[in-house]
Image (cartoon, rainbow, N blue to C red):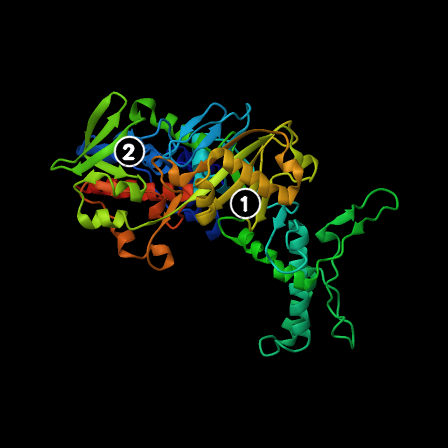
Amino acid sequence: MSQTRRDFLRRVGIAGGAGVMLHSMGALGLTSAHAAETPPFTPPKKSDLGRHGRKTVIVMGGGIAGLTAAYELLKGGYEVTVLEGRGRPGGRNRTVRGGDTITDLKGQTQRATFSKGQYMNAGPGRIPQMHVTIDYCRELGVPIEVFTNQNADAFLYRENVPGALNGVPVRHRAAKADAYGYTAELLAKATDQGSLDQYLTAEDKERLLAYLRSFGAIGNRVAGDPAASFRYTGGGRRGYATQPGAGLESGTTIPPYAMSDLLASTVGNYFSFEMGFDQAMMMYQPVGGMDKIAYAFASAIGARRMRYNAEIVEYRNTTSGVEVVYTTPKGPKKAVADFAINTIPPHIAAKISSNLPTAVVTALGSVSVTNAGKIGIEYDRRWWEEDFRIYGGITNANTNLGNMWHPSYGYNGERGTMIGYYNTGGNANFYGNLSPAERLAEAVRQGKKIFGDVYGEGITASYSRDWASTRFSEGAWVSWPGAIGGQTGAAYRSLLEPAGNVYFAGDHLSHAIAWQHGAMVSARVAVESLHARVTAA
């Protein structure tokens, strides 16, 4: 690449951020199509406004969508005011640290007592590397580190299933090796015995058999003995009772689980999780907590433009723009502007007084709300590392715990904070109906089934979050009625357009619901739409 081209890309990156630079590289043929998958976006420039004059925008909500919208509008010379009901930026992006005090809608108050350096991400906790969230971390100077989304040494636990694995913690690597091994054995036998001849050429059959031997660590063909051919017998990839060591210690392998027991346990169904486009390793997290992103946005936007503890109680279109009424600790106030971008969760926005068309209010209220719950449990020692050699990753269970996250920071430290459960739907509602003390007790009771008594020992702090009873959120995320998640339905589509001078944005108006990426790209679309309208006038 020439120096001139490098200089050009550097200037593009400075002016428009990493996302614009990536797309410029794609246009120059410097990246593959797969490397430029983030939605294209051209930030507004101050020079675009020209004769149109300075325009004002009220951003309703200081979550990730609102922060993104405000940040990008400021690049274009807009005057922006962000109204946020909470006393902090980020919305559902919430990192809980020692000293934080939170009261939920049920009147339950928790004061977190985590030690210095310990925290829990009560909302989003991981970032796929292809999401624009990574681009904003780079642009805003937020350092990131690896989030271990899958760990071969973590456990899978299933209870109330038939077979010998009922109630038995199974190492992820052992379950995966056995599931792949038995699958490969069966497919190899079927292939070799002619069951797939109508689909495969002779050359394809041999190539498939070679692949399956590698994929499943199975044996070779045994001439004249189909039953003995391509046998899966376990091996080192599933783990060792005694690891290979010095001298004559070659290691002692552990026999595989019986195929029928493995199938009955359903643990094999879990492996599709790590194949998901938005769940595949590697994944990342900001160093020190997810809210580092929110605070970096707020810093870039500027304190004078951020109004916290400002609960919106009314908004309406006017003949000249918009007006928004909000309450503050000092009483009600009113803000006026040329436009507004509404990033409030739709089921809450539908309940706020407005003069929006009835169809728009109905669309906002048509969503289904999903609850999620998390608990952070701090221990006085990192027993999952010391006793089980689990460094990061997820232990998954079919109990009400759902997922347990082993922390991806502070390795080999004196203390550590696990996410003791991360669950959704009915299990989240179950925990949400308990008091914080009862949530901890139940989480410990369930955790002991997997890890033993150590799970209840040395606990120094805990904090639990029920998103359904969290003020200004009242849920973790939403879904739309209709096919394909509802993003093809009339309600969803109606909110992609402004209602008068009010625009809408949020992860709920994306195909990445529940991800910060969805909030960001939705906000960018709203900014582009608003800016195009202004400059076309």
Disc sitting over residue 319 in the figure: none
Instruction: Give neighbour class at mark 2: few <14, some 14-19, many 20+ (Cα, 10 Å).
Output: some
Of helix, strand and loop, which one carries label 1? strand
Residue type, mark 1 in image = Asn
Q: Residue 340, image x and y in percent?
A: 23, 36
Q: Earlier in the sequence, mark 1 or mark 2?
A: 2
**Picture quarter with the C terminus:** top left
Residue at (56%, 42%) from the top-left corner?
A: 404
Residue 407 position within the rendered picture, expressed as x and y whole percent measured from the top left: 58, 36
As shown in the figure, which amino acid type bears the numbered disc 2? Gly
* On screen, residue 248 above or below 285: below
Query: With 318 as the anchor, is 199 left or right in this view?
Result: right
Task: Look at mark 2 in the image and give the residue it sits on.
Answer: 76
How many marks on residues? Answer: 2
| Element type at mark 2 | loop
140 sits to left or right of 367: right
Q: Determine which quarter of the picture holds residue 140.
A: top left
Question: In which quadrant of the rendered view does residue 214 lie?
Answer: bottom right
Q: Residue furthest top?
A: 330
Q: Is residue 29 visible?
A: no
Q: Position of residue 250 (x, y in %)?
A: 83, 49
> Which residue is at a point 55% across and 49% down the rendered structure image?
399
Where does label 1 land, which residue?
A: 403
Residue at the outermost left position: 319
Distance from the alpha carbon under mark 1 to that under mark 2: 43 Å
Give percent across and percent down for residue 500. 18, 43
Q: Residues within 10 Å of mark 1 (few under 14, many from 20)?
A: many
3 lies left or right of 356: right
Q: Nearer the viewer, mark 1 or mark 2?
A: 1
Q: Nearer the viewer, residue 417 or 537?
A: 417
